[in-house]
Amino acid sequence: MTDTAKSDKVCVVVGVGEGLGAALAVRFAAGYKVALIARSPEVIGKTAGEIKSAGGIALPIQSDATIEAEIADAYNRINRELGPVEILIYNGGRRPMGRLMDTTPKVFEETWRLHTFGAFLWARQVVPEMLSRGGGAILITGATAGVRPWPTSAGFAPAKFAVRGLAEVMSRDLHPQGIHVAYVNVDGGIDMPLLRKFRPETKDEDLLKPSAIADAFWYLAHQDRSAWSHELDIRPFKEKF
């Protein structure tokens, strides 16, 4: 399928905010009907409008990725209005900063729920239908903290380590059954309004472009099944690692 091809296939992007989530929805709208999922309506509504204006098909759904009943409702609506899910992109976005004693149990648990538990719940929702047809893809957004954490990632890093482990477990389980699962380690700052606000001195070349990250997800989603990746690192050319 080419970048501009339209199909009846459906891509779900969970966690559509300013920056990467919106870029993922726009990128996959080039070839899929796209469902945009987030807890707040502002960005999904705006991004869905942009996709529709460009001739694409977009369905914004306000839903909490940590509540199983809301996920089930969202999934059923997607199937009803768009069709079976071909690709699930899980893009958890909560990024608390803090050392061990700065991180409350509430923040720790909420961060794990958004990044790991939500990915687990959404995967369990889409996998049965994918298994029935022997195909599909689940792509999960990772971060440096899930591989090489800083002392100030007491809440974020354990959540990313956990979802990275979940992605590898699902890869080993589901690849032989025709479902491609991959974890994308986004190793660096993403160019988005919030980061620019707190780091105004940052240059363009220091950051990952959301559209470029979305291209990497597109590549993963369309790998030939004879050469699947289960983990992909992406970072700015000047980032140390």
Image: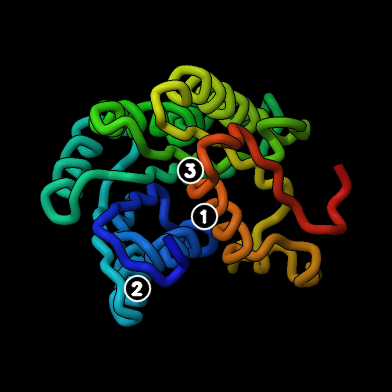
Please state which of the two labelled residues, at mark 1 or mark 2, is closer to the viewer.
Answer: 1
Q: Earlier in the sequence, mark 1 or mark 2?
A: 2
Q: Earlier in the sequence, mark 3 or mark 2?
A: 2
Q: Residue placed farthest to the left in the image?
A: 80
Using the image, determine if residue 98 lies above or below residue 83: above
Q: Which residue is mark 1?
A: 218
Residue under the image location 40 percent in, 68 percent down = 30
Q: Report how far apart the C-alphas of labels 1 and 3 lie in the structure.
A: 18 Å
> Visible in this render: residue 31?
yes
Is there a contact, CB below 8 Å, between mark 1 and mark 2?
no
Q: Position of residue 83 (x, y in %)?
A: 18, 50
Mark 3: amino acid: Gly
Q: Which residue was labeled with disc 3?
A: 92
Q: Position of residue 225 (x, y in %)?
A: 51, 37
The amino acid type of the residue labelled 1 equals: Trp
- Percent from the top left, x then y, of residue 76? 15, 42
Question: Are the residues flagged by discs 1 and 3 in contact, CB closer than 8 Å?
Answer: no
Question: Is 15 situated left or right of 130 in this image?
Answer: right
Q: Is residue 67 visible to the viewer in this orientation of the structure?
A: no
Q: Residue at x 87, y 58 (%)?
A: 238
Q: Residue furthest front?
A: 226
Label 3: element kind: loop
Depth check, front residue: 162 or 237: 237
Front disc: 1 or 3: 1
Please name the residue that numbered disc 2 is placed on: 51
Q: Quadrant of the N terminus?
A: bottom left
